[in-house]
Image: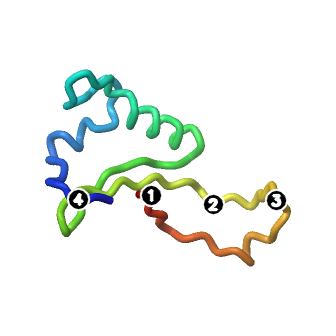
């Protein structure tokens, strides 16, 4: 989440398309790779307008019953949204 000027609707519609960039020297691959990895694992990647300004990027993964660490997942509730600075 950020508090910058935000992302216009026109730009946000193409944000996850490969090779689409607004930055000089950018490749336009970063967010398209994120979206493809999320989709390959049954998840989603999206951007939303932040009511206070800026944008919120959300990457969601489906919940799994598998736990490689052996803990009962019911004992450790996962937050719905994790903010990464």
As measured in the structure, the alpha-carbon distance from the residue carrying label 4 to the one carrying label 2 is 25 Å
Rendered image: mark on residue 49: 4
N-terminal of the pair, mark 3 or mark 2, is: 2
Are circles 1 and 4 on residues that touch, CB within 8 Å? no
**Number of the front mark, 3 or 2:** 3
Q: Is residue 57 left or right of residue 37?
A: left
Rendered image: mark on residue 48: none
Q: Considering depth in this image, is 66 or 70 the residue closer to the camera?
A: 70
Looking at the image, residue 66 lies above or below residue 75: above
**Number of the front mark, 2 or 1:** 1
Q: What kind of element bears circle 2?
A: loop
The quadrant in which residue 64 appears is bottom right
Q: Write the residue at 36% across / 53% down.
A: 57
Q: Considering depth in this image, is 70 or 26 the residue closer to the camera?
A: 26
- How far across and how far down the image is residue 10, in percent? 15, 41
Rendered image: mark on residue 69: 3
- For label 1, the crowd category at 10 Å Cα-Cα, with few meaning under 14, some 14 to 19 and many 20 or more, is few
Q: Quadrant of the N terminus?
A: bottom left
Q: Write the residue at 20% across / 68% down.
A: 51
Rendered image: mark on residue 84: 1
Q: Write the residue at 44% across / 62% down.
A: 83
As measured in the structure, the alpha-carbon distance from the residue carrying label 3 to the one carrying label 2 is 15 Å
Q: Write the residue at 23% across / 41% down.
A: 13
Q: Is residue 84 left or right of residue 55?
A: right
The quadrant in which residue 25 appears is top left
As measured in the structure, the alpha-carbon distance from the residue carrying label 3 to the one carrying label 1 is 23 Å
Rendered image: mark on residue 63: 2
- How far across and how far down the image is residue 41, in percent? 59, 43
Q: Residue furthest right?
A: 70
As measured in the structure, the alpha-carbon distance from the residue carrying label 1 to the one carrying label 4 is 16 Å
Are circles 4 and 3 on residues that touch, CB within 8 Å? no
């Amino acid at each position: 989440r950020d508090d910058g000027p935000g992302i216009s609707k026109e730009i946000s519609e193409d944000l996850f398309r490969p090779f689409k960039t607004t930055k000089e020297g950018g490749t336009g691959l970063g967010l398209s790779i994120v979206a493809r990895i999320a989709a390959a694992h049954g998840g989603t990647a999206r951007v939303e307008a932040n009511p206070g300004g800026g944008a919120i990027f959300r990457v969601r993964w489906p919940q799994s019953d598998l736990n490689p660490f052996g803990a009962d997942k019911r004992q450790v509730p996962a937050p719905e949204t994790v903010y990464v600075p």
